[in-house]
Amino acid sequence: MRCNYDYGQIKVQATVDEVKKARRRRIRRKIFNLSAISIIACECLQAVITIFVDSFLIAQILNNPANTVAENIINIGIFYVICYSVVCLSYSVSGIVLKRINKSIFVSIGAILLTLVIVLVYFIGENISTYVPLLAVLYGIAYSFFSSGFTNLTAETISSKHQVRFFAVKKILFQITYIIFPITLGVIIDKVNFTFMAMIMLVICAALIVFSFLIRPKKIYRQAFNLKKFVKRLKDNKEELKPLLKMYVTNFFRGASYDCFTTLITILVMKSFGSNTSLGMFQSIFTACSLVTMFFYLRYYRKKRAEKFIIPTIVLVAIAVIAILCATNKVTIIIFYAVYAILNVILMSISDSRRSGVVRQLSLHYHILESNAIAEFFMGAGRVLSSVVLLLSGVLDNVVGGGTLFLKIALGFVCVMYIFYGLSIIWLEKSLIKQDERFRAAHASEKITKNED
């Protein structure tokens, strides 16, 4: 048997493979430079702070032995009503400043303010309930500074042709954060104490400040900010901008359901299990399970198939809520937590993509600051509404005494808002599809090219 070997060809092939590998390394270095890594780090670190505040700080308020459960729920309601009102107002005026300075500076200011909130929590220790209004104001200001600066910062740092890979990596690391830290924080609080946990959070805040100063946008989009003029444009072009108006409605129902659901889950778990470890363990486990849901979503979702994902989600969540209303026990609470945490990522992913898609499809990049301000105002209005309902449930349960009847009514109200949230996303999807079809029909003979940046 005779074999012929072409060593020159093998050498050429090896060189081609080496060139491809070198090219991939250059692309990775180009995408994941110091600024990109800092953006990912800031989002993950800020997520840890959010986990701490929305779960364990709220649990600390709920566990105050000096008050009844209803009185503690009143304090939680006060915290969120004040916090979301501050966020809502801050977004309405932040664009005036954002059009003049780099968004990365806003992120750094927000990181510093978040650190001040944690410093105050550390010195307060376990006597949180006394300072609820002050904490709510400071956290609302800090959160609005950070998030308003962080929004659209990626567009100024990562070119659009690399954003798919960048967002994929960022989403994976973000999910890992929500898997690792809830159980870790819960165990530390239960095994050591809340004050020690606050000290650890100070270290995380310090890292957040450092990374925030390392973000260097490649380009700065100089944008106008004139809410009055933008609102007038919305009124004058209702038909053309109908998808945008529907996106604002979707944001309202999202605000009225998502955040309050998270708070109610914390209250239900702490009332039934009384353990920060249990609270963190459930959040970590169900977040890990949600990765499977994300796989199916990314694998099978298409723009015209939104109903096949959304309808089952809101139906199953509604059934789980009904089960709690009929029999509130550990089993029904775990089922509700599992169903909501595992399936809710679908609605969140679709609404997030549609929010950015509306701006892109309607070519409103120049008015992104005004659009974001109005979108956040609607979401903030929804958050304030659900927080007021939560506050009233605590007041009424406190008047009645001993029971949680009105807390269950609040849960039912939030569930209705969640159903409207899902239906409004379907409504928005159909509007975008019609808009896209009209655009293609009007420009059928034109060759349309995409500008990546």
Image (cartoon, grey):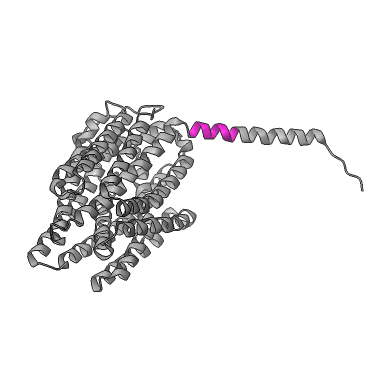
The answer to whether residue 240 is left or right of residue 39 is left
Q: Position of residue 430 (x, y in %)?
A: 35, 54
Front one among 431 and 72: 72
Residue drawn where x is 36% and y is 49% of the image: 432
Res 244 seen here: no
Quarter of the image for residue 220 reads: top left
Q: Residue furthest front?
A: 192
Q: Residue furthest bottom?
A: 326
Q: Position of residue 311 (x, y in %)?
A: 35, 63
Res 171 seen here: yes
Q: Residue furthest right?
A: 1
Front one among 193 and 176: 193
Residue drawn where x is 70% and y is 32% of the image: 15
In magenta, the rendered stretch is: 23-31
Residue drawn where x is 38% and y is 29% of the image: 214
Per the image, is 401 magenta? Answer: no
Name the dominant secondary structure of the magenta segment: helix
Quarter of the image for residue 318 reads: bottom left
Q: Position of residue 296 (x, y in %)?
A: 47, 58
